[in-house]
Amino acid sequence: QVQLVESGGDSVQAGGSLRLSCAASASGFASDRYMGWFRQAPGQKREGVAATSISGESAFYADSVKGRFTISRDSADETLYLQMNNLKPEDTAMYYCAARTRALNVSPDRVLEAEEYAYWGQGTQVTVSS
């Protein structure tokens, strides 16, 4: 069973930055897949934050994070990143890395839907204080 392992979560002040990382436990797992970041605050539904296409050439963002968050993938070390700048208290949540089934495309209107992803990490907590 392949595992996705997130890291980089922390407690920061509003306006601060964090970079989350996601590594797969199996070599080659992260290639040829859509991958994304999701978040879930207590009592809230899990929501898509950002996703990247199989090639990494296309990125998709939730409106709430556009211009502040950047998703990227490093093919060399097979790691997915989420650079988060100008953090706000409403960004406070558990952040999860997710991956789709290999080589399976997804339409842009579904790419940030949690149901489209088959593999999930355990999450890393981000807390932003005002």
Image: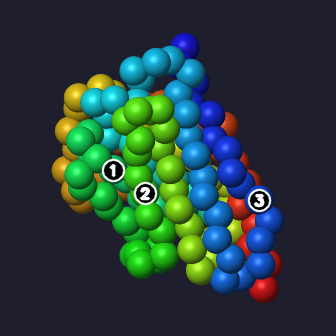
Q: What amino acid is found at the position of numbered circle 3 in the picture? A: Asp
Q: What amino acid is found at the position of numbered circle 2 in the picture? A: Ile
Give the residue at the far front of this rendering: 76
Q: How far separated are the C-alphas under marks 1 and 3?
A: 23 Å
The answer to whether residue 71 is seen in the rendering is yes
Q: Dividing the image into 4 quarters, which one contains the C terminus?
A: bottom right
Name the one closer to the observer, 94 or 28.
Answer: 28
Can you give x and y, in whole percent of width and height, for residue 60 in the image?
32, 61
The residue tagged with tag 1: helix, strand or loop? strand
Q: What amino acid is found at the position of numbered circle 1 in the picture? A: Thr
Give the residue at x 77% y 59%. 10
The residue tagged with tag 2: helix, strand or loop? strand
Residue matched to label 3: 10
Disc ID at residue 18: none
Give the residue at x 50% y 17%. 26
Q: Answer whether labels 3 and 2 touch (C-beta < 8 Å).
A: no
Q: Answer whether labels 1 and 2 touch (C-beta < 8 Å).
A: yes
43 with respect to 59 (left or right): right
User: How many other residues sit within 10 Å of disc 2, few (<14), some (14-19) or many (≥20)?
Assistant: many
Q: Quadrant of residue 88?
A: bottom right
User: How many other residues sit within 10 Å of disc 1, few (<14), some (14-19) or many (≥20)?
Assistant: many
Residue matched to label 2: 71
Can you give x and y, in whole percent of width and height, for residue 52 in the image?
33, 50
Give the residue at x 30% y 58%. 59
